[in-house]
Every structure is written in C-alpha cells, then in structure tokens.
Amino acid sequence: MLFLRSLLFALGMWLSTLVFAPLAVLTFPFPFTVRYAFITRWARFNLWWLRLTCRLDYQVRGRENIPVGNAIVFCKHQSAWETLALQKIFPPQVWLLKRELLWVPFFGWGLAMLEPIAIDRRAGRKAVEQLVTQGGERLANGRWVVIFPEGTRVPPGQTGRYGIGGAVLAAKSGYPVVPVAHNAGEFWPRRGFIKRPGTITVVVGPAIESQGKTAEMIKEEAREWIERNTRGLGPRADSDAPVG
C-alpha cells in the first residue's frame, strides 16, 4: 500500500507540473504578487494531494517567532517536502537556487516568474557576491529570502557543511535570520520514492539578529539552533499512525 499510495502521489505531482508549468510562464505580464499567488498554488495542491494519498501531514511549532517584517529563512534540508511547505508557512518569498534550473523548459521558465536568486555555484567567491547583490535587492523589495545553508539534502541524523553565503547576506543587509528545523526526511527520504504516513514537525525558531555580528557568528548561531532542534525531534514515530 505504501508503494501504491506513493505512486498515486507521484502521478498527481507530475500531472500538476505539466499543467502549472506552462501556465506559470504565461503570468509574466502580471506583477510579482499575482504571479506568486498563482504559481504557489502548485505547492499547496501537492501538499493537499500528499495528505490525501500518502496520509502525510505536518504541524508547525513556533509560528509566533515569524517576524512581522521580512527576513532570511535558514532551513534544514532533508527532503523535497520542505520546498513545498515553506511556501505555505512563510509570506511571499524568493529562493536561492542554481541558475541552471531556470534553463529547464517550462519548469525553469515558471521558476523564473518567482524572481529567484539564481547563482552560478561554480563561480566560487563571485557566487557569494551574486547572492548578496540579488538577495539584497529582493529583501529591499519586501520579499522573504529562503536559503538551505547545507546546500543539498542531508539524511536525518547527519549534518552537512553550512555555507557562509546566507550569513554574509544577513550580515551585509542587516536583516534577521529565522532558523527552521524539521524531520521531513523521516517520512520523505532523500531520493526516496516511498512517502510514509504520519505528521512532520516543523519548528520555527526565534529570529537571530544580524546587526553587529560577523557572518561567521550568524552562521554558527543558526547552525547550532537548527541542529540542536532537529535532534530534539528524534526519529520518526509509528509510520502507520493515522493522520488527523
């Protein structure tokens, strides 16, 4: 049943992508708020579809820690799931991603409508400069900025190397960092096809002020909070527990 449920979810996700991607490209004449509201319906649909087919839901702790003004989100990266859920948990946002993704026909073109921070990761120090320049512009325009500081998905129980780029953006822009921990990888594993039923827990931490701190200080403070709270969530509970 887990395989069949996961297959049904995958089919729905693929079909919804085929429908939404071309339509997303057609939103280019509209302002960002309209484009964002339409395109993120894809994420909302797939979260609903995931709950319906795989009985996988989520809960959020610490919503009161989300600032009124925009900020930079540092999120643990375990799964593809958080790329969907963060769009619903936080206000309108832009993402840090590899610019090569924007070249993918229709899917990448649709991503471009969301004004992401697209960098060349092979550029070394220049990639950080690109992040600071583009990220500063997005923040000044009222957008939230979402960054996975580990850069790639890391299995539960492991910690990737935290990059300095997001912390440099915070230090130079003065915007706070909101750390996010979760245990999505226990239910939707990295490169895993099977989605296990249950309830993912997302924890939003208190904002980390960046003014007067170095990038290294910001990075380490965020890393310590994220890793400590991720460990605090523990392993996945009963995988067959029903979702309310």
Image (cartoon, rainbow, N blue to C red):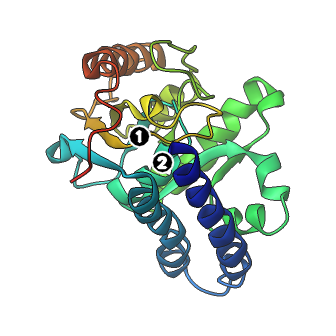
Point out residue 9 in the picture as x, y percentages from the top left corner.
Answer: 56, 58
Count of numbered circles in the view:
2
Considering only order in the chain, which callout, 2 or 1, is on the residue closer to the N terminus? 1
Point out residue 230 in the picture as x, y percentages from the top left corner.
Answer: 33, 21
- Residue 28 in view here: yes
Residue at horizontal 48 percent and vertical 33 percent from the top: 172
Q: Quadrant of residue 226?
A: top left
Q: Which mark is residue 145?
A: 2
Point out residue 152 in the picture as x, y percentages from the top left corner.
Answer: 63, 28
Where disc 2 sits, the SS reads strand
The amino acid beneath tag 2 is Val
Residue at horizontal 38 percent and vertical 43 percent from the top: 197
Residue at horizontal 53 percent and vertical 55 percent from the top: 138
Of all residues, the one furthest to the front in this rendering is: 1
Where disc 1 sits, the SS reads strand
Q: Nearer the viewer, residue 162 or 43?
A: 43
- Between the residue at mark 1 and the residue at mark 2, the CA separation in whole angstroms equals 6 Å
Residue at horizontal 68 percent and vertical 34 percent from the top: 129
Q: Would you call the spot at circle 2 few (<14 residues within 10 Å), some (14-19), or many (20 or more)?
A: many
Q: Quadrant of residue 42?
A: bottom right
Q: Which mark is residue 73?
A: 1
In the rendered image, the vertical position of residue 159 relative to residue 180, given as above or below: above
In the rendered image, the vertical position of residue 169 relative to residue 20, given as above or below: above
Q: Would you call the spot at circle 1 few (<14 residues within 10 Å), some (14-19), or many (20 or more)?
A: many
- Residue 90 in view here: no
Are the residues tagged 1 and 2 within 8 Å (C-beta)? yes
Q: Is residue 230 left or right of residue 92?
A: left
